[in-house]
Amino acid sequence: MKIRSKVYLNTKDEQAGLAVWKQGHIGIYLGDGKVCESKGVAHGVVISELKSNTWTHYGKLKDIEYDDAYVVYRKEVKPETYLMYTIKRGDTLWRIAKRYKTSVAALAKLNNIKNPSLIIAGRTLKIKEDK
């Protein structure tokens, strides 16, 4: 068993499946800064942040196969959704931003508008939807 005495894993050592522990407590590193650990009867098994606990050791456990290609934990990525708005004659980016509770700067950035004072009727704008 390879054991290192550290408080936190180095980036180069962050391999899913590594055991992390301190006196009387153990967890399994899942990747992306997350650890699966037991918090006792009241809380059960939880996924917590690696840095939220004062782990003193980490290492590979005997008889466990470690495969770099296998990822245990992936951060959930929610897809961005947008409303599509067709610019009408007389519209201004300021009025559109106000109507959809956003800012002129946010609309300009999202739609690659270099001059927010110059928008063209008939073109379509993406507007980020509120979740």
Image (spheres, rainbow, N blue to C red):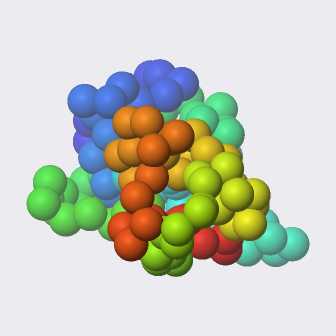
* Residue 10 placement, left or right of 125: left
- Residue at position x 49%, y 28% from top? 8
Tell me which residue sits at (38%, 36%) in the image.
114
| In the depicted structure, whether residue 60 falls above or below residue 65 | above
Q: In the rendered view, would you say 127 is above or below 25?
A: below
Quadrant into which the N terminus falls: top left
Between 84 and 40, the residue placed more toward the observer is 84
Residue at the front extreme, as displayed? 90
Rendered view: 36 above or below 15: below
Location of residue 54 by image quarter: top right
Q: How many marks?
A: 0
Q: Quadrant of residue 59?
A: top left
Q: Is residue 66 found left or right of 77 in the rendered image?
A: left
For residue 37, say whether it is visible: no
Q: For residue 44, which quarter of the picture?
A: bottom right
Instruction: Residue 88 in the image: state x and y as whole percent.
Output: 52, 72
Left of 25 or right of it: where is 89? left
Query: In what quadrant of the picture does the C terminus appear?
Result: bottom right
**Which percent across, then down, holds residue 83?**
52, 77
- Seen at 47% across and 22% down, the residue is 6
Q: Residue at x 28, y 33 (%)?
A: 13
Report if residue 15 is visible in the image: yes
Task: State the residue lying farthest toward the right.
Answer: 42
Of 32 and 14, nearer the camera is: 32
| 34 or 103, nearer to the observer | 103
Image position, residue 36 (x, y; %): 54, 61
x and y percent of residue 110 in the render?
A: 44, 51
